Image: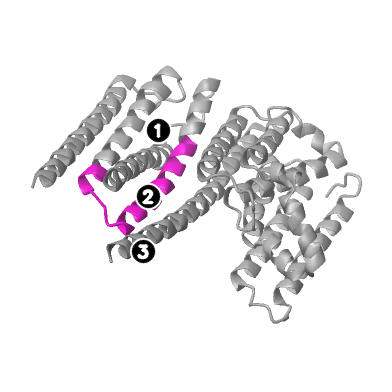
């Protein structure tokens, strides 16, 4: 394993962050303070999300130059981990675990203009796809292996923008200004198309210094792996629509029953 | 008013599922099983890549959307089989025709098969597409007529 400005300590940092993230979440979720029980499913999702994120970082940090490993890390850290973590509703857990003043402060922050702007599906999608655009066709990819800081920045951006994007489409944490179903559906479709285009074009236009076979494998991992996670997002989006439509229908039915009596 | 929304949903669910099925068959049968289609043709121009990406994404999206719409139709007890099936045939045929004429021929994304005389493949592909669309239109016309009869009765 070679070391770019402390690769080992970076891995230690990731392991520490992983354990800390799991510990804080468990502490909040399992604290018996007379609150209703926090769903087990969410605890499992959170731990799974943390593990996927850490394994993704490890996959690429131990062997920088392997493009296929980079592709696995990309799908894991940028798409799968954010989806799992987002489904664990960390925002809801924080709001209910914090004492009144910090909870109110957090709620106010979630309602603030910058947060609203960042969690608007179009903004999140542009941040997410724009980052990928810079990384591959934009030619940033080779430099992340020369510059350690850039390497970290790119992966952090990948994760954060992936989280913002999946939360803006199908988030379950309270979002006072959630975009309309139509907006979310169109943006999700556009991002899925962008993913397919970007990953497929890597098949034929490998980044400099990446062997053809590696680029082809990496491109297909991104293409089909991205599909799998995106389809899960589509299912979540429509499951929300289905629940909402059922609620509207029941309301209408009870109203017509009342008026017919 | 409610009736027309419901028949609209039947048709929409059918068309979306048709597009999804055509996309799925294209991916699973022609790309993965037969390996006739290529993932990426070295000569693929940018416009073909963009169009392929949009349709690839949309066929996944359409499949999921269609199934949830279908569940909603069943929940409302307003399922109209011939409208739904008509929609499926039209969606399937339209996607196949687009794939066969625009993506394969005009944009040159990839060919149906390599190292063979393409004409019989292209003809079969596109004739099947037209037959599917025609079948769908017939089913829709029939569903409209039967609805008219029910309304008269």
Residue A146, x across and y down, in percent? 85, 36
The disc placed on residue B69 is 2
Marks 3 and 1 belong to one chain: no
Regarding mark 3 in the picture, which secondary structure is present there?
helix
- Parent chain of label 3: A
Residue range in magenta is: B56-85
Q: CA distance from mark 3 to mark 2?
A: 22 Å
Q: Is residue B43 visible?
A: no
Q: CA distance from mark 3 to mark 1?
A: 55 Å
Name the front one of labels 3 and 1: 3
Quadrant containing the C terminus of chain A in the rendered view:
bottom left
What residue did someone put label 1 on? B36
B74 inside magenta stretch: yes
The residue under the point 81% across, 33% down is A143
A151 inside magenta stretch: no
- With B104 as the anchor, is A237 left or right in this view? right
The residue under the point 71% across, 51% down is A111
What residue did someone put label 3 on? A254
The disc placed on residue A8 is none
Q: Which residue is most to the top?
A: B106
Residue B33, x across and y down, in percent? 40, 42
Query: With respect to residue B118, does A76 lie above or below?
Result: below
Q: Are marks 3 and 2 in contact (CB under 8 Å)?
A: no
Residue A16, x across and y down, in percent? 83, 62
């Amino acid at each position: 394993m070679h070391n770019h400005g402390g690769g080992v300590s970076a891995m230690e940092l990731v392991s520490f962050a992983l354990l800390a993230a799991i510990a804080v979440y468990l502490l909040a979720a399992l604290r018996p303070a007379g609150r209703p029980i926090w769903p087990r499913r969410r605890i499992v999702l959170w731990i799974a999300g943390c593990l996927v994120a850490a394994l993704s970082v490890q996959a690429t940090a131990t062997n920088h130059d392997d493009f296929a490993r980079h592709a696995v890390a990309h799908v894991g850290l940028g798409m799968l981990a954010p989806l799992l973590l987002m489904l664990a509703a960390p925002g809801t857990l924080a709001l209910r675990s914090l004492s009144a003043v910090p909870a109110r402060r957090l709620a106010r922050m979630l309602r603030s203009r910058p947060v609203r702007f960042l969690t608007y599906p179009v903004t999140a999608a542009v941040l997410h796809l724009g980052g990928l655009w810079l990384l591959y066709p934009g030619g940033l990819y080779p430099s992340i292996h020369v510059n350690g800081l850039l390497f970290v920045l790119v992966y952090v951006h990948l994760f954060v923008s992936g989280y913002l994007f999946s939360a803006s489409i199908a988030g379950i944490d309270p979002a006072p200004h959630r975009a309309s179903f139509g907006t979310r559906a169109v943006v999700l479709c556009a991002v899925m198309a962008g993913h397919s285009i970007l990953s497929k074009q890597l098949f034929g236009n490998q980044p400099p210094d990446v062997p053809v076979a590696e680029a082809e494998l990496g491109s297909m991992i991104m293409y089909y792996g991205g599909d799998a996670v995106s389809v899960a997002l589509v299912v979540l989006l429509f499951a929300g629509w289905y629940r909402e439509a059922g609620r509207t229908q029941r309301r209408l039915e009870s109203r017509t029953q009342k008026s017919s009596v | 008013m409610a009736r027309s929304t419901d028949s609209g949903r039947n048709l929409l669910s059918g068309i979306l599922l048709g597009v999804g099925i055509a996309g799925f068959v294209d991916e699973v049968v022609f790309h993965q099983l037969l390996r006739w289609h290529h993932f990426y043709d070295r000569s693929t121009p940018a416009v073909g890549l963009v169009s392929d990406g949009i349709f690839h994404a949309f066929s996944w999206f359409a499949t999921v959307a269609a199934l949830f719409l279908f569940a909603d139709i069943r929940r409302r007890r307003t399922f109209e089989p011939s409208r739904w099936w008509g929609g499926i045939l039209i969606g399937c045929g339209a996607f196949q025709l687009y794939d066969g004429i625009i993506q394969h021929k005009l944009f040159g994304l990839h060919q149906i098969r390599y190292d063979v005389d393409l004409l019989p493949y292209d003809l079969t592909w596109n004739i099947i597409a037209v037959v599917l669309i025609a079948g769908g239109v017939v089913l829709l016309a029939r569903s409209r007529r039967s609805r008219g009869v029910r309304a008269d009765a």
